[in-house]
Image (cartoon, rainbow, N blue to C red):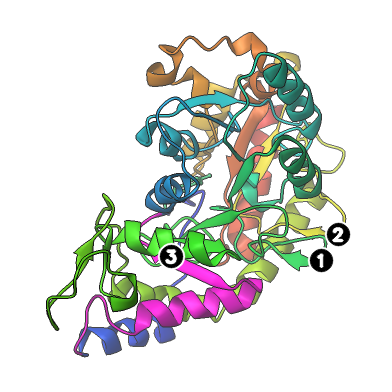
Amino acid sequence: MVIPYARQSISKQDLNAVAEVLQSDYLTQGPVVPAFEEAVARLVAAKFAVAGNSATSMLHIACLALGVTTGDLVWTSPISFVASANCALYCGAEIDFVDIDSETFNISPVALAAKLELAKKSNRLPKVIIPVHMGGQSCDMQAIGSLAQQYGIKVIEDASHAIGGSYNSQRIGNCAHSDITIFSFHPVKIITSGEGGMAITQDESLAHKMRMLRSHGITRDATEFEFANDGPWYYEQQELGFNYRLTDVAAALGLSQLQRIDSFIHQRNSIASRYSEAFASTLVVTPHIASKSISAFHLYIARCDFEKLSVTRVQLFQRMKDMGVLLNLHYIPIYRQPYFAKMGFDPKAFPNAERYYEQAFSIPMYADLTETDQNTVISSLLNALSTQ
Ligand SMILES: *Cc1c(COP(=O)(O)O)cnc(C)c1O
């Protein structure tokens, strides 16, 4: 049996919750989506939550709600999934990247401050920045938030890895230093709804815009109509929106999974501690743990200086696979993707992201990873790194 890098954890309760919706009147646009939204809002102490069919969709309409359009500039981390950058391109904006911190793998506030100062001089400040909580560990949101305020920039937290985690002893998602936070419910993430995402905000008008945009730009609220209300059938499309809705079937799975969020985070942190203990004083560099934060530990990102080893990373991946352990790499710097490279990015502008890409790999991490399987991962990795 192969040990994957990530997988979902599905309980009997999850199965029952989904079955119940399948036997109910509404498979979509029923009561479970709002119940899921309210539960997530309560968890993170936010006023508004807007569910959708993926984090990618929600990133898109979060950008639109903040007014991102043609000619605007959006900045994000180069070490992220491509969706963190694509959302800006969907709006006709241009994308640029801010180098990461070499310890946290998150956007470096120092690099951000320097880049903002230059951008201001050349009158090319971004409209929005999208910090990504890499692996589940929060960015330095206090520093990022205060820079954003200083320069009049909006902030979307891409917290696709981070639901259930905390920053400064508060849940990630309370938008204390941002306008909108986005969660993903893809099966590899902390909790899943199959596919799904959610946008969190404390701002009622942003929540309202995102609710409209996720469903064709349509409103049925008579108090909002621009034209005369023709009758009980009447609704208005006021914006160009999309069908980005989450189904009630998916929301039932998400809501059921949410009941176990704290145990998921606990299990992931226990697994991370065991890894870090096992790799202390070995060739494996373990991830940095920030104080006053709890990582959701979506990923356990190890690093090795392969230049000093007799094994290449390609060989490491192959040897691990031969031993039944699948590694992964999160992520190829976005500017290295052909689609982005054509925009003319120079990898030399992002030295920390480049070094990260030479050294990093993700090892298996999921709530149901057994101690036996974890021991297999540890011994296989040490073995694969030491043999010639
Ligand atoms: C998974 C992920 C996304 C996209 O999430 P989907 O729900 O699959 O659309 C966006 N950003 C990051 C950082 C992710 O890891």
Which of the 4 quarters of the picture holds residue 229? bottom left
User: Looking at the picture, which amino acid does disc 3 mark?
Assistant: His
User: Looking at the picture, which amino acid does disc 1 mark?
Assistant: Ser
Q: Is mark 2 within 8 Å of ligand 1?
A: no
Q: Is residue 252 visible?
A: no
The one nearer the camera, 367 or 171, is 171
User: Looking at the picture, which amino acid does disc 2 mark?
Assistant: Lys
* Quadrant placement of the N terminus: bottom left
Checking the image for residue 292, the label placed there is: 2
The one nearer the camera, 380 or 40, is 40
From mark 1 to mark 2, how far is it between C-alphas? 6 Å
As for residue 33 lying within the magenta part, the answer is yes
Relative to 24, 172 lies left or right: right
Query: Badge 1: how crowded within 10 Å, few (<14), some, or many (20+)?
Result: few
Residue indicated by mark 1:
169
Could you say where residue 381 lies in the image, as x and y percent from the top left? 65, 39
* Quadrant placement of the C terminus: top right
Label 1 near label 3: C-beta < 8 Å?
A: no
Seen as rendered, the residue at the extreme front is: 228
The residue range painted magenta reads: 25-54
Q: Find numbered disc 3 in the image and state the secondary structure of the residue it sits on.
A: helix
Which of the 4 quarters of the picture holds residue 151? top right
Residue indicated by mark 3:
208
Q: Nearer the viewer, mark 2 or mark 3?
A: 3
Label 2 near label 1: C-beta < 8 Å?
A: yes
From mark 3 to mark 1, how far is it between C-alphas? 29 Å
Mark closest to the chain's N terminus, 3 or 1: 1
